Amino acid sequence: MANILLLNGPNLNLLGSREPDIYGHETLTDVEASVRTVLENARHSLRAEQSNREYELIDWVHDARDDHAAIIINPGAFTHTSIALLDAFNAYEGFVFEVHISNVHKRESFRHHSYIGLRADGIIVGCGVQGYELAARRVVTLLSQTD
Ligand code: CA2
């Protein structure tokens, strides 16, 4: 059994309430529940957090160094700006999966580059909120191979 951390960055607390054409109708609570189901069915546990503040996300990555085997993160717009968040991930040794609900490569060019992508073990883009569940399934597979 392992502990997994799910992080969501700025504005993702608004999921389901605005811009459904881009981000869909499901809420962050729905997303967290679907990830929890995948992980708990595999006897893992989930901690889920969302923040609009860069330092809080960094602190949670630091905390995870001791006792979390994987982090699944949608860093929101910090994806494209935050070297500080990349540095935090570079000091973390577990699995890292980056999720983007929209296909960032079909959008503005400033969304095409990801700092976290330099560290991530995998990136899921443009699969809607299902991308979180796909990332969780990949984490379960990897953890089963490292038992
Ligand atoms: O596609 C994604 O998941 C993004 O990480 C979402 C970020 C965006 O800055 C990235 O380029 C791609 C924005 C999150 C905003 O979330 C909202 C959700 C519902 C309503 C309004 C904003």
Image: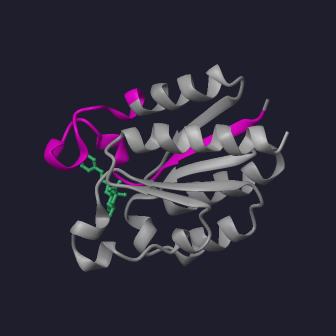
Quadrant of residue 18 within the rendered picture? top left
Rendered residue at 82%/45% (across/down): 146
**In which quarter of the view is residue 104 placed?**
bottom left
User: 110 left or right of 131?
Assistant: left
Does the stretch in magenta take in 18?
Answer: yes
Q: Position of residue 11 (x, y in %)?
A: 33, 51
Stretch of the chain drawn in magenta: 2-30
- Left or right: residue 16 versus residue 53 is left
Instruction: Give the percent coordinates (x, y) of residue 68.
Output: 75, 44
Residue 126 placement, left or right of 18: right
Picture residue at 19% right of the left edge, 50% below the top: 22
Compared to 43, does 63 lie above or below? Answer: below
In the rendered image, the vertical position of residue 61 relative to residue 37, given as above or below: below
Q: In this view, does 50 lie to the left or right of 16?
A: right
Q: Position of residue 77 (x, y in %)?
A: 37, 64
* Quarter of the figure that contains the N terminus: top right
Whole-percent x, y for residue 131 in the image: 41, 44
Point out the quarter of the image occupied by ligand 1: bottom left
Is residue 34 magenta-colored?
no
